[in-house]
Image: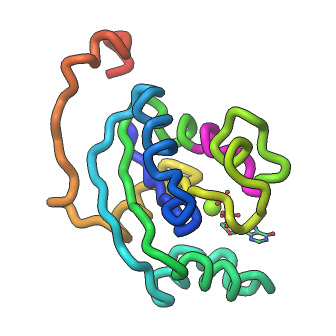
Amino acid sequence: MERTLVILKPGCLQRGLVGEVISRFEKRGLQLVAMKMVQLDEEILKEHYAHLLDKPFFPWLRDGMMAAPVILCCWEGYNAVQVVRDMAGATRSSKAVPGTIRGDYSVSSQENIVHTSDSLENAEIELKRFFVESDFCNYTSPLNPFKYAPDEM
Ligand code: IDP
Ligand code: MG
């Protein structure tokens, strides 16, 4: 089954939306396999947002991501990368569809509540960036037969 990285951004924490957002992933049927709260620094943000380093908004994004701690989560499930990405909604929250996390809790392009990996390949790279192997908890939910067909597990 796929694993993907979600970062609950500083705004999610400061606005008291952590439980709300985690609850959505749980209710969708995704399984939490790793989680930790950390203060990000400039070095790791330059790596994580390398594709945006030359954008004029990068310094604001970097400072926003360091403005408070974040919560790093790894969610596991069938098609988890795309499922989680779709649940987050469009990057520009003002365009995000209601019902998505960004579409329900934000209007900003920068302060958009969550980071989600955009491909299976990047999910693997990003999970290695923030977690070590022993952070991942391997357990099987007894509810899996009620959440999945045999070929989806
Ligand atoms: P994503 O988070 O939906 O994958 P990316 O293009 O990878 O979007 O951008 C990473 C983060 O950079 C966004 O989540 C957002 O916080 C910020 N960002 C992206 N585009 C803009 C912009 O045009 N203005 C301000 N911040 C932006
Ligand atoms: Mg991205």
Residue 80 at what x, y percent from top left? Answer: 46, 37
Residue 125 part of the magenta-drawn span: no
Please give left or right for residue 139 compared with residue 152 in the image: left
Residue at x-position 28% and y-position 11%: 145
Q: Which part of the image, by quadrant, shows the C terminus?
A: top left
Looking at the image, is 129 positioned above or below residue 43?
A: above
Residue 18 at what x, y percent from top left? Answer: 46, 52
Q: Residue furthest right?
A: 95
**How many discs mark residues in the rendered view?**
0
The residue stretch that appears in magenta: 85-92
| Front residue of this view, candidates 67 and 110 | 67
Image quadrant where residue 104 sits: top right
Image quadrant where residue 65 sits: bottom right
Residue at x-position 50% and y-position 89%: 42
Please give left or right for residue 9 compared with residue 44 in the image: right
Q: Which image quarter has ligand 1?
A: bottom right
Looking at the image, is 101 positioned above or below residue 40?
A: above
| Front residue of this view, candidates 119 and 89 | 89
Residue 24 at what x, y percent from top left? Answer: 50, 35
| Front residue of this view, candidates 54 and 92 | 92
Q: Which part of the image, by quadrant, shows the N terminus?
A: top left
Residue 87 part of the magenta-drawn span: yes
Please give left or right for residue 23 compared with residue 50 in the image: left
Residue at x-position 70% and y-position 83%: 60
Residue 82 at what x, y percent from top left? Answer: 57, 39
Residue at x-position 35% and y-position 73%: 38
Image quadrant where residue 101 sits: top right
